[in-house]
Image (cartoon, rainbow, N blue to C red):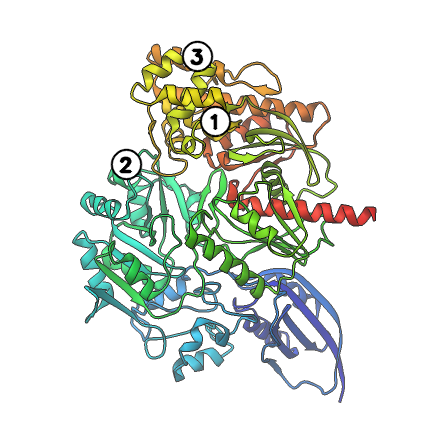
């Protein structure tokens, strides 16, 4: 007997999050009959009789914690035979229009379970539909156990009963496991598995000052006691990482003992993504944890392995990426033994395969920003702005440093996780693997490729070899477009004034840009103003050696004698001759190199940086004591198209001669830079040339600069949109989003004019 009902399509992040059992329970409560299943487009519900509006509303409003419902679409449906009850049906065929769920930190229920008597007490792979591995173990869609690395572990009767019970929180939890049937944990030392409790053995080794390799969710960490100076020195020496800050992991109690998290910081720390969060330090840990910094990068334990280890150790642990310098994070067992054996005194291992490498994300709560997009955030998507509804499928290849790709499909943008520096051969292999992986997983069939203007970038070469029409996008235009897209600025939203400050990117005039005020939209830009260009003597060496930038800027300011006094042992005349002859000394308007120059003058790692951005990060940390709120900024010259930093160096010299603290000088530099750029951008709005202001580029990962620019713009332009990054990186890790949007916009405009 036929019966009329409804077919309901739910789109979004709705697989692997307990959505089907949620629908089953809801249908039981409302006496509805029919079925619910996963398929390539999300979740499909067929119900009889026609459901009440309350059912449709609940599908959005009462969804499980990890679900992200983007659309609920209803059409009439006729059942050929009257359904007798409501069931969860088998998944439909493979495909990829649904959203894949990111990995999620251990939920409170599972944490309580592993810490309490019961069959999962102390079990390092406990999870449920509200937490646990997802993207890191996924091999194909729809998301089911057989399409994940958990396929190797057959369910025991107890787990099978939980899996099959719609009333259980583990109903259809694909990674479900217990000690009887799931992955196992063990401790290795000297090439052999050590009998006994692996967590207790690992904690004992850490307390003894040893370095351990710990296999986690998206790869290996190298761990040591963060309060032990000798252990820190050992890890830094072995990893050849003299001063780059270490990420830390501890319980909430331990984090509070060593840092000063705000309420917003705690909210971010406890997010299911569980990122590393930058929070103010109490100064109680050794300086070697984060040399020269005022913040610590901390995270809470996010897997049962980490919870058990942190509880047993009862202190703060360094948890830094397990890799050789510059290479991708290690994920495999044999790979770890081969590559990390020289670093680690022991290994905490498990046998659940890691399908894809995922670094920990790094974020800040105030101002909100993502410094590195990683585990827990990918493969999350964001909607395209109005006007892009018919955008084609696009792949954007990103930048050379902090590489990431971006896919456009079905009105959504999917920005990948951080992939690293493509100058490293193994990172380039991982980049190629990630492109294939994302394309296969999401059924992506692009008709356009987008990439940087720079012909020497590996990402550009990959785009040009992809066999697709290629849109080459200027680096800073892409930064600007990424900020517009994240803030859903419409395709026809009007021109925007963009302040783009970063290290450098190739300009259409053949020089290296990096301190820019642009006016434009997704389609095109005009360069309105920029920092006065200075030579970069030695090319790439000028990025690593701040004194080179300082000498060039001081010479431009007529302060060569001061440069000679500050850097007496440096080969100053050699680089001056290079600059004069224009030999390996390209001109650049880079704001990043200006930060380096000021840092070098103030004595911050003047001769060489041990990691990218070190001088600028130390300069910000030095300035934090003084502001810059209320601090008068150094003057950056007259209001012209070329923003001349020469005057600030004269003021800086006088300030230091007057015994003004270096920290106050650093704050005045931040304030002056912000005032010079925001003032010019605001005038574009005030004169009717722009509708909003955007902030983008790697320099806006500097919290002090970002906060001051935002404050100035909101005061000067009340009610005017300021488009800043909050969810995607302001640096090169977000540039692929902008490339993709520009390519799509030009395609759409071309289609309109055909």
Q: Is residue 253 above or below residue 177?
A: above
Between the residue at mark 3 and the residue at mark 1, the CA separation in whole angstroms equals 28 Å
* Quadrant of residue 218 within the rendered picture: bottom left
Task: Point out the residue furthest to the left here.
Answer: 208
* Quadrant of residue 601 within the rendered picture: top left
Q: Are marks 3 and 1 in contact (CB under 8 Å)?
A: no
Between marks 2 and 1 in the image, the one whose residue lies nearer the viewer: 1
Q: Give the residue pinned by disc 2.
A: 283
Q: Is residue 59 above or below residue 659?
A: below
Left or right: 192 in relation to 402: left
Disc 1 crowd, CA 10 A, few/some/many (<14, 14-19, 20+): some
Q: Quadrant of the N terminus?
A: bottom right
User: Which of the two residues, 112 or 309, is positioned nearer the viewer here?
Assistant: 309
Residue 93 in view of the camera: yes
Between the residue at mark 3 and the residue at mark 2, the CA separation in whole angstroms equals 34 Å
Q: Are marks 2 and 1 in contact (CB under 8 Å)?
A: no
Task: Point out the residue furthest to the bottom here.
Answer: 1
In percent of width and height, residue 194 lies at: 19, 69
Q: Is residue 519 above or below residue 557?
A: below
Left or right: 458 in relation to 6: left
In percent of width and height, residue 332 lies at: 36, 64
In percent of width and height, residue 210 lies at: 20, 53
Disc 3 crowd, CA 10 A, few/some/many (<14, 14-19, 20+): some
Q: Give the residue pinned by disc 3.
A: 650
Q: Give the residue pinned by disc 1.
A: 583
In percent of width and height, residue 172 lies at: 50, 75
Marker disc for residue 507: none
Q: Is residue 29 above or below residue 603?
A: below
Residue at 67% in and 59% down: 410
């Amino acid at each position: 007997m036929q019966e009329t009902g409804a077919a309901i399509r739910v789109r979004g992040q709705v697989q692997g999050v307990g959505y089907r059992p949620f629908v089953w329970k809801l249908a039981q409560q409302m006496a509805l009959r029919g079925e619910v299943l996963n398929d390539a487009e999300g979740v499909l519900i067929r119900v009889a009789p026609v459901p009440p509006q309350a059912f449709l509303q609940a599908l959005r409003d009462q969804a499980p914690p990890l679900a992200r419902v983007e659309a609920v679409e209803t059409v009439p449906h006729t059942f050929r035979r009257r359904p007798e009850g409501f069931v969860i049906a088998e998944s439909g065929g493979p495909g990829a229009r649904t959203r894949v769920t990111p990995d999620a930190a251990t939920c409170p229920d599972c944490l309580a379970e592993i810490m309490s008597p019961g069959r999962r007490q102390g079990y390092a792979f406990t999870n449920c539909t509200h937490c646990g591995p997802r993207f890191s173990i996924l091999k194909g869609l729809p998301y089911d156990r057989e399409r994940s690395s958990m396929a190797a572990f057959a369910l025991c009767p107890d787990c099978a009963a939980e899996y099959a019970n719609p009333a259980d929180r583990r109903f259809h939890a694909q990674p479900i496991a217990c000690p009887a049937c799931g992955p196992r944990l063990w401790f290795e030392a000297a090439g052999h598995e050590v009998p006994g409790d692996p967590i207790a053995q690992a904690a004992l080794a850490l307390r003894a000052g040893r370095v351990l390799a710990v296999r986690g969710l998206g790869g290996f960490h190298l761990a040591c006691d963060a309060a032990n100076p000798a252990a820190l020195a050992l890890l830094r020496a072995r990893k050849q990482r003299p001063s780059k800050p270490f990420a830390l992991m501890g319980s909430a109690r331990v984090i509070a003992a060593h840092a000063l998290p705000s309420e917003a910081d705690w909210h971010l720390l406890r997010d299911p993504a569980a990122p590393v969060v930058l929070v103010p330090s109490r100064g109680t840990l050794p300086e070697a944890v984060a040399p020269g910094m005022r913040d610590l990068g901390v995270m809470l334990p996010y897997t049962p392995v980490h919870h058990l280890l942190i509880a047993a150790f009862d202190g703060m642990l360094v948890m830094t990426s397990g890799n050789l310098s510059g290479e991708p994070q290690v994920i495999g067992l044999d790979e770890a033994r081969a590559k990390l054996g020289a670093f680690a005194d022991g290994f905490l291992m498990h046998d659940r395969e890691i399908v894809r490498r995922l670094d920990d994300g790094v974020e800040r709560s105030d101002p909100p920003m993502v410094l590195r997009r990683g585990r827990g955030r990918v493969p999350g998507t964001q909607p395209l702005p109005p006007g892009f509804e018919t955008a084609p499928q696009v792949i954007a290849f990103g930048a050379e440093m902090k590489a990431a790709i971006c896919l456009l499909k079905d009105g959504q943008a999917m920005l990948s996780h951080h992939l690293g520096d493509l100058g490293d051969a193994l990172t380039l292999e991982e980049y190629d693997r990630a492109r294939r992986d994302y394309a296969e997983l999401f059924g992506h069939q692009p008709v356009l490729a987008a990439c940087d203007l720079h012909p020497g970038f590996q990402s550009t070469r990959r785009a040009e070899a992809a066999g697709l029409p290629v849109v080459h996008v200027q680096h800073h235009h892409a930064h600007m477009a990424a900020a517009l897209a994240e803030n859903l600025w419409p395709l026809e939203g009007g021109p925007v004034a963009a302040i783009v400050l970063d290290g450098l990117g190739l300009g259409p005039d053949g020089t290296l840009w990096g301190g820019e005020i642009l006016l434009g939209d997704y389609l095109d830009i005009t360069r309105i103003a920029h920092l006065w260009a200075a030579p970069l003597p030695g090319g790439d060496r000028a990025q690593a050696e701040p004194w080179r930038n300082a000498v060039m800027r001081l010479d431009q300011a007529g302060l060569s004698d001061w440069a000679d006094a500050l850097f007496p042992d440096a080969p100053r005349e050699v680089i001056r001759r290079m600059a004069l002859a224009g030999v390996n000394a390209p001109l650049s308007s880079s704001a990043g190199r200006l930060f380096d120059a000021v840092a070098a003058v103030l004595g911050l790692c003047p001769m060489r940086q041990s990691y990218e951005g070190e001088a600028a990060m130390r300069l910000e940390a030095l300035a934090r004591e003084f502001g810059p709120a209320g601090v008068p900024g150094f003057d950056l010259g007259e209001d012209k198209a070329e923003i001349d930093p020469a005057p600030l160096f004269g003021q800086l010299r006088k300030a230091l001669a007057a015994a003004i603290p270096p920290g106050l000088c650093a704050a005045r530099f931040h304030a002056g830079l912000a005032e010079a750029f925001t003032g010019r951008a605001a005038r574009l709005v005030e004169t009717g040339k722009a509708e909003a202001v955007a902030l983008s580029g790697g320099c806006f990962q500097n919290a002090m600069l970002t906060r001051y620019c935002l404050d100035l713009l909101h005061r000067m332009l009340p009610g005017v949109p300021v488009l800043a990054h909050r969810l995607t990186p302001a640096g090169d890790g977000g540039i692929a989003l902008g490339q993709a949007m520009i390519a799509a916009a030009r395609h759409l405009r071309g289609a309109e004019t055909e």
